[in-house]
Amino acid sequence: MNKEREQFGSRLGFILAAAGSAVGIGNLVGFPVNAAKNGGGAFLVVYALFVIALCLPVMIAELAMGRNTQKGPVGAFNQLAKRSATWSIAGFLGMLTPFMIAVFYTVISVWILGYLFMAATGDLAFLATDGTFGSYISSKHIFAAMFAVVAIIYLILKVGVQDGIEKLSKILMPALFFMLIGLVVFVLTLDNAAAGIEFYLIPDFSKITASVINGALSQAFFSLSLGMGILVTYGSYLTRRTNIVGSAKMIALADTTVAFIAGLMVMPAIFSFNPDVDPSELSSSSVGLIFVLLPKIFLALQTTIGFVGASAIATLFFLLVFFAAITSLVSIIEVPVAYLMDEKQQSRQKALSVIGVVGGTLMVVVSLSMGMVGFLSEMVSYGSGVKSLFDIIVDIFYDTILPLNGLLLCLFVSYRWKKQSFSEELSIGNEGFEGSFMQKYLNLSLGTFIPVILLLIFLNTVADKFFAYSLFGF
């Protein structure tokens, strides 16, 4: 092990950092609505089963590869596969994917910061006006917010793993949790909030279809940051004392808990605002809910808690979402930064500068594709219609490549690194692992049914996104 490599200072710091990478915009808004649209409590049950049975093994495998090699995805695949050309591609995808995700995720974070500023300055009526979101994201004002977001990320990552990522997570994750709890308590006092809770929690198993099952699995896989190279990179910062299996369980529990509690905030608020709402007609897009629907709910609160109260609640909400976005962005960008440090022997500051220049240029171009430049806004037509550059990046690197990355990792751990070597790594820091049920389950699942399921998700995503066709008829 390289003694000079940065490490997390504590197990708690690592768990909070990894949970911060997983807890993002999709957890706070997308998850509750997906649950409501797909059987409420029944969806929650299916989701929890997938987290335990499918996602947890993949998470453990990523962490084990990182700690064993003390490298990010590129270095880990190269070292364990002895620089096999085939597996080098898998490692490269594990680095490129988070870099491209960071581009569009930063753009969304910029929009959130802009809305946070407008909510804090009392512009609720403007935020709730139809057309505001479209006009804002196609205005030049976003570039000032972009500079601020990039500066925040740069300052956090510049100081390193312990003093940057870990300290940030120890502050923002508890703050995020307490803000979320505070908003839940407030929302539950609203009229008709009980109807939202009932719809969110009472299982309706008649709604469980193949489509719902696919949606629950995809949500679980994406929610836990799997296939992004983040957990391989974070695993490389772990000490040999760390119990990987136990830590992975805590990360999954924290992520799922936040997503569940977020549902107690979002669904009662929607039902309170519109008692006759049909959840099946809600958009599953987190972007649409955050920037179009929820501002209208906040504005409506003025009739009950006044202008100041409504503005305070809106500000708290956007601050909550911004904190979630920042914790995710820090972990996502750390992957390509670690790549330049490990494989190109660059200093952290130089690596950040390179990522900042290349990534920043792409962020500007992607922002221009949101209505400012016609060519970028309507680049190509496929699947469901005309796509902007922003749409293309999301479709390829978020929706499509992630399950492919997970598939490749499962096959690699089981058949190239070998199950015995994998088990030996997990036994370090976990004396009871050898011969346990968890060992047997990991060795079985990662080499058999999990790759099959991820392959099916990947193929169906390609067919759906790019050809508007479902392989399974849903």
Image: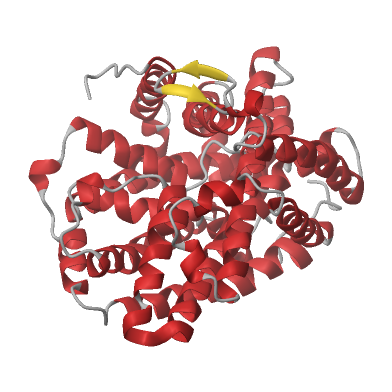
Residue 90 percent coordinates (x, y) = 62, 23
Residue 71 lies in what quarter of the image? top right
Please identify the quadrant where the C terminus is shown.
top left
**Percent position (x, y) of residue 122?**
55, 76
Q: Nearer the viewer, residue 57 or 395?
A: 395
Q: Is residue 302 visible?
A: yes
Residue at screen point 43% across, 64% down: 295
Residue pictured at 57% horizontal, 48% vertical: 135
Which image quadrant is residue 373 in? top right
Question: Tag count in the figure?
Answer: 0
Relative vertical location of residue 190 with respect to residue 206 in this rendering, above or below: below
Confirm whether residue 431 shows in the render.
no
Q: Position of residue 154 (x, y in %)?
A: 80, 56
- Give left or right: position of 220 versus 360: left
User: Which residue occupies the foreground of this view, 165 or 138?
Assistant: 138
Q: In this rendering, would 129 be left or right of 397?
A: left
Q: Residue at 20% x, 67% y: name it.
A: 197
Foreground of the two, 113 or 74: 113
The quarter of the picture where residue 390 lies is top right
Residue 87 percent location from the top left of the image: 64, 19
Task: Give the residue drawn at x 38%, y 57%.
Answer: 293
